[in-house]
Each structure stands twice: as structure tokens, then as C-alpha cells.
Image (cartoon, rainbow, N blue to C red):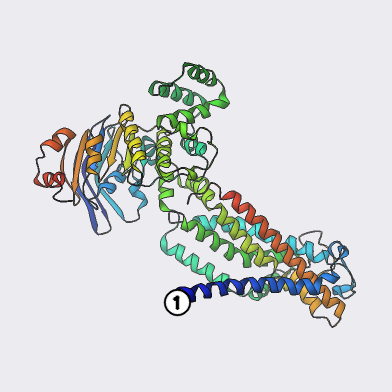
Amino acid sequence: MEETFFKGLMIASVATVLALLVGIILVITLRGASSLNLSMLIQTPKGGYYLGKEGGIANAIVGSIYLSLGATLLSFLFGLPIAFALQKEYTGRHLSNITRLALDILWGTPSIVYGAFGFVVMVYFGLRASLLGGIIALTLLMLPIMTRSMEEVIRMIPFELKETSYSLGSTRIETTLKVIFRQALPGITTGILLAFGRGIGDAASVLFTAGYTDYIPRSLSDPVASLPLAVFFQVATPIPEVQQRAYASALILMVIVLLVSIFSRLLGRRFSRYIVR
Amino acid sequence: MSHISLRKLTVGYGNLQVLRNITVDIPDGQITAIIGPSGCGKTTLLKSLNRLIDLYEQARVEGQVIIDGVNIYDPKTDILILRKKVGFLSQKPYPLPMSIYDNIRFGPKIHGMDGEQIQRRIAALEKQISLDEPSLKLAHQKALFKKSRQMELLVEYYLRLSGLWNEVKDRLNGPASQLSIGQQQRLALARALAIEPEVILADEPTSALDPISAQLIEKQFKLLKENYTIVVVTHILRQARRIADYVIFLYMGELVEHGPAEQFFSSPRDERTRAYISGEIS
């Protein structure tokens, strides 16, 4: 009896999650597919703020990719060393606990706060909204997510594996780079993906910092468009055709996230061939 | 071969004292078994010999462990050189997250073994390993002069030395984690041997293994003792009887008795030893 109940509960939970995913994809596809065409992918908008009903959203697609790739790279460059350094061989228990707490708080901070913070800093330095500003704001958002998820994986690595490495006469650095890194690689990939997915879909942090433009940026100091903001602007218009294009934009955003997700899954599977269970 | 002497070795974790005042000499080129009931400090003693104990936050060590005339707890001791000299086998083998081949190569690589050292090492290993076919020997001799083949040859020899070669020669690039646990332990042995230690420490190396794999490990130890000083922690009395030349008996963190295996088992001096051997206490 109890067995049947919990089994039913589990099946219901799985069904709910799947139904949600299918539902979202279905709604976006049904409403957006009709206005999705090649020109939408490769042209920049005709008529400011997407209001022209013509052209495409190439500015936002490229912009979002620039922003999130840049921020992913930057977060990784800082995040991985932090995740490694939080191991007990490098950092004392108190300091690492405080760092973890700080990262958790940052993880939970709403992205609009990062956007506002970035904006204040930029105003102080007299900078205008730009690709670089957007990347930095996004990095602030992504860094805690990436670092914490990578750190969690590194912490789960059995102590005996480290002991084995040390017993062969390797240094801390050798153990970290040659053993821990390889063992944690699938988890590190997941951490990167998690942060990337969060970053590419975020509108609030780039609202003030990256700005808006109808063009594809040519340098780090140009303002840059992004997909979430493109969806936001288009949905907010009273024009039905433009609203429909908002769903097409959302579909493109989802497809990008899905592709990256599948790709990193495959990559993760490749990396996990050698890991020790 | 290295000589190990313990002088008043006392080890504790925080307020808990695990080993008290251990003074003993471990004979060279023999298998020494450390026996005693669970929690008597066997593993702690073993991990004190290559300073793996340093990895435990609260561990405190007093007294001396002298290997080849040098106190390894002297602040000037290079811990990496020490660990290179003293190979270690853990209770449950942990393959490194890489291929079988890379597991063996790991040690020589981090210690920066170069072509000439590898050649010298292979020459030394050839004396320890008897190859079944003369033609194979000739092929190996030729391969030795090709730089690209030297490391492969070295890996092969260590795998032969630990009795694993025939089982893995066709899947050297496969993941080491897919080996059976018995094979993993022999891989760990080959990997430890590849750092050219003079001492081999083994912490209950067969406790996670099936009887056949366990027998293989014991057999390898008996073959290896000619060239290495081997210290095995075991709580299996029968295993100590089978392989040990010298026995150290610990009880509640104290060294109760030590001596040549034959004498230790036939005429124990201490009452606790007699009780332990006869199975009255465990």
C-alpha cells in the first residue's frame, strides 16, 4: 500500500516536470513558429526597437552569444581557481566556509541587483552601456553559480583518491591539476552549462549595463542587444505581428540553450569515461 | 633497500592518543606484518611511515621514524622524496581517473624520469622479470633503443612485475576504473612500483579482494621481497602466518611484541600475544 502510494507520487512528479517542459516548448513553438524564418535569424531589425515587423533579430542572437560566452569565459577563469582553492589542503575551514556562504548569498541575489550595481559603477566611471559592461554584470551573476557547482563536485571526490595521488609523491598542484581536475571534469562541464544557461536567459542584469542597439557590436565598447530583452520589448508592444515575433525569439533562445545542453551532455559523457566511481 | 627504525613514536588525533611510544626496527628485504585488533593503530602506524598522516588535520606526531639514517619528521626532510622512496597500497585500491597506461606513467612523469633513467630502470627490471620467450626478449632489446617505445616498455615491465600484464595488454588505453577490484589492486601495486620505491607499505591490501586476487597479491609480495622492504598491515592472522617473515603485534596503541614470524607464532612471550594468536581475544 505504502509502496504503491510513493511509487505513484514519484511517477506524478516526473510527469509534472516533463509536462511543464513539453508545455513550454509547445506554446512557444505554436505561437512563434509561423513568424520564424531565415531572415529572422540573419537580418538585423528594420525599424527601431523591432517595431518595424520586418528584418530579424540577428543583433540580439549575436549579442546574446557574445555576452554569455564572454561572461562564461570570465567566470570560468575566476571560478575554477576559487573552486580548487576551497579544498582543505589550500584553505582553512573557516575561510572556506565564509567563502561558500558568500557565494551562496551571491547566488541568491536577484539579477536586477547586479544590473543596478553594474550601472552605478559604470556611471561612476563615466562609462556607457556596452558589451564589456554587460559581460561584467553577467559574470557577477554567473560566477557564484559556476563556482559553487564546481566546488561541490570537487568536494565529493573521495579523500582516498587524493591520498593515492599524494602517496605517489605528487605535489598539491600536481594532484589538483592531474587528478582532481580530471575526476571533476564532468561536474565542471555541468557547472559551466548551468551558469551559461542562467546567463544567456537573464534580462535584468544586462538591461542597464549592455544597453540596446539595432546593430551587431563591433567592439567591446559598443552597446549590444540580447535575446531576453528582445523578447521583452516585442511582447510589450501592442502590435500582434511583433508579439508573435517575440515567441519566435523565445524559441530561438530555447533552441540555443537546448543545443548547448545536449552538446555539453555529450561532452560530459566523453569526459566521464575515465572517472573513478 | 631501506632500513626503517621507529624511536618512541607517539601519534594522536586531537586529544585521542592512538600510538604510544613505539620503538622497533623493521628488517630490510623481508615482509613485516603489523597485526592486531581493529582500532589498535595499525593503519596510523603505517601512514606515519610515509607521512600520509600529515593529510589529517588533527594528527600529532612525536618521536622519530628513521629511514636510511634520516629522521623523516625532521623539518628539513623533503616529503616528496620520502614518498617516492616509500610506495603505498591502500585498503581499497583507487585507480587514478585515467587510462591503465597513464596510471603507471603517472609516477615516472611527475618525478621527471628521463630517457637515460628509464633505460637504466628497464635494464634493472629485466633481471627481475623472466620473459617466457627468447624472441620477445630480443624484440624488447631492440625497442629499448627507440625513444618513443621506452615508456611503453617501462609500463609493460611494471605491469609484468605486478602480474597484471597478460590481463590488460590489449586494453592499455581503456579506463583503469573498469578493471575488477583485484586487478585494480595489482594496478595500484604496479603504479607504486613505478615510482621506484625501496619500501612498500600496504594497508590491508587484500581485505576488499576476492580470494583468488588476494592470493595473487600475496604471491607478488613474496616475489618482490627480494628487492623491497615490505610492511603489510593485516587483521587476518592466517595471512600473517602465510607471508610474514617478521611480526609486529599492536594492542590498544601499544607495541606488545615483535619478532621473527616463526618464533612469534610458536612461542609468544607476552600473554596478550598468546591470547590473540589462539583466538581468545580478537
Q: Nearer the viewer, residue B43 or A120?
A: B43
- Residue positioned 66% across, 60% down in the render: A261
Q: Nearer the viewer, residue B69 or B171?
A: B171
- Residue positioned 52% across, 40% down in the render: B99
Total marks in image: 1
Hey, which residue is sitting farthest front in the picture?
A: A1
Is A258 positioned to the left or the right of A96 in the image? right
**Residue A187 location (% of width, % of height):** 55, 56
Residue linked to disc 1: A1
Is B218 positioned to the left or the right of A35 in the image? left
| Secondary element at tag 1 | loop
Is A90 positioned to the left or the right of A132 in the image? left
**Residue B248 location (% of width, % of height):** 20, 40
Residue B137 visible? The answer is yes
- Quarter where residue B89 is shown: top left
Residue A211 visible? The answer is no
Q: Name above or below for residue A77 compared with residue B250.
A: below
Quick one: label 1, few (<14), some, or many (20+) residues within 10 Å?
few
**Residue B249 location (% of width, % of height):** 18, 43
Mark 1: amino acid: Met
- Quarter where residue A41 is shown: bottom right
**Residue B63 location (% of width, % of height):** 23, 45
Image quadrant holding the N terminus of chain B, namely top left
Is A16 positioned to the left or the right of B39 in the image? right
Q: Nearer the viewer, residue B42 or A49?
A: B42
Hey, which residue is sitting farthest bottom in the picture?
A: A238
- Quarter where residue B261 is shown: top left
Q: Nearer the viewer, residue B196 or B170?
A: B170
- Residue positioned 58% across, 71% down in the render: A14
Q: Name the chain letter of the residue that bears numbered label 1.
A: A
